[in-house]
Amino acid sequence: MTRSGFVALAGRPNAGKSTLVNSIVADKVAIVSDKPQTTRREVRGIATGPDWQLVLVDLPGVQRPRDELTERMQRRVEHALADADAVLFVLNGEQEVGPGDRFIASAIKRAGARAVTAVNKVDRLGRPGTVAALAAAAGLGLDGEIFPISARKGTGVAQLVDHLVALLPEGPFLYPPDEHTDMPEEVRLAELVREQVLRRTREELPHAVEVEVTELEHREDGLLVVRAQVWAESDSQKAILVGSGGRMIKAIGTAARREIERSRGERMHLELQVRVRRGWRRDEGLLDRLGIE
Ligand SMILES: Nc1nc2c(ncn2[C@@H]2O[C@H](COP(=O)(O)OP(=O)(O)O)[C@@H](O)[C@H]2O)c(=O)[nH]1
Ligand SMILES: [Mg+2]
């Protein structure tokens, strides 16, 4: 008999949810940065063992709704908590437990979801710090076990996975066993480009940028050919993204291409074009096309 099901990840931005999904799936399915709103789309990471399949739902961060984009993100979070077989609450062990964590804990309780807590980043804490962080996590009053982990180093992740698998209902696999994510390839590639934009930009720019793959071709000679548009919301943002003499967008493209080539062992031709689309965050049609539900 096999077990399979969905585990939704909840936690404040920067707690390490996306890093943990990548670590469990052993593939880069979710992009990571230290900027808020890195995770915009719900990303499903799929991990498969001999007789189990764990589908991890990496949720966008919860924020005050300001526009259609954040509202959509928020709605997804509420649905995902209610639909999941279990919720994995990820705490940033480096930070004090705060109002944001208490808010999420109460949302989990309200959803009636089975919860497991992971105190992340213990690689930065040492023993006394870890003990204190575990005690603070227990103070949130969720039922269910608490695991100290380091998503970055992999410490404690295997034990956490064993525990999550034991919570899954019996049932057949939901995805082919060799699949690591249900994201379309265009979206996955666009996200890897956006990750490089996030690394190189500050302030309002990371929020203002979106990437759309407009052409994707696997050529017979093995070359992957991708064309993508990088959307900004204003001409001044576009100027920053292009950089003087096109240097910024070139650096973004080179870094994204290298990372994609390395992870796939494929050669790639990547063409990026920066364009202005005012108010794209409020454009429902565009959000649909970009796969932001
Ligand atoms: N030291 C340390 N840093 C981590 C760990 N997990 C994640 N991070 C870092 O924390 C930041 C936020 O990670 P991310 O996965 O994007 O968090 P998310 O917003 O919850 O998805 C990134 O800079 C990660 O590299 C960890 O276990 N240890
Ligand atoms: Mg994330």
Image: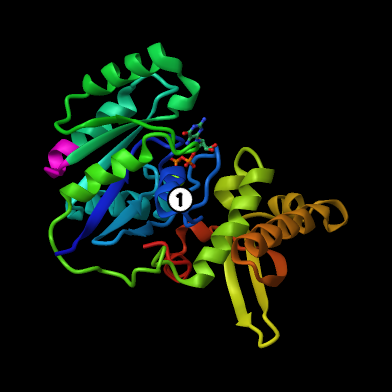
Q: Quadrant of the C terminus?
A: bottom left
Residue 141 at x, y percent in the picture: 17, 24
Location of residue 261 with respect to 205 vertically, above or below: below
Q: Position of residue 173 (x, y in %)?
A: 24, 68
Q: Position of residue 242 (x, y in %)?
A: 77, 56
Query: Assess mark 1: CB under 8 A from ligand 1?
Result: yes
- Bounds of the magenta segment: 108-114
Does the magenta portion include 109?
yes
Q: Which quadrant of the rendered structure holds the N terminus?
A: bottom left
Give residue 142's quadrant in the image.
top left
- Placement of 268 over or under 8, stated as above or below: below
Residue at image location 17% in from the left, 53% down from the top: 168
In the image, 181 versus 277, the foreground residue is 181
Towards the viewer: 96 or 291:
96
Quadrant of residue 128 within the rendered picture? top left
Q: What crowding class fits label 1: few (fewer than 14 Cα within 10 Å), some (14-19), or many (20 or more)?
A: many
Name the residue type under label 1. Answer: Asn
**Residue at 80% over, 52% down:** 243
Q: Is residue 72 magenta?
A: no
Q: Which residue is label 1 attached to?
A: 22
At 62% across and 59% down in the image, what residue appears? 193
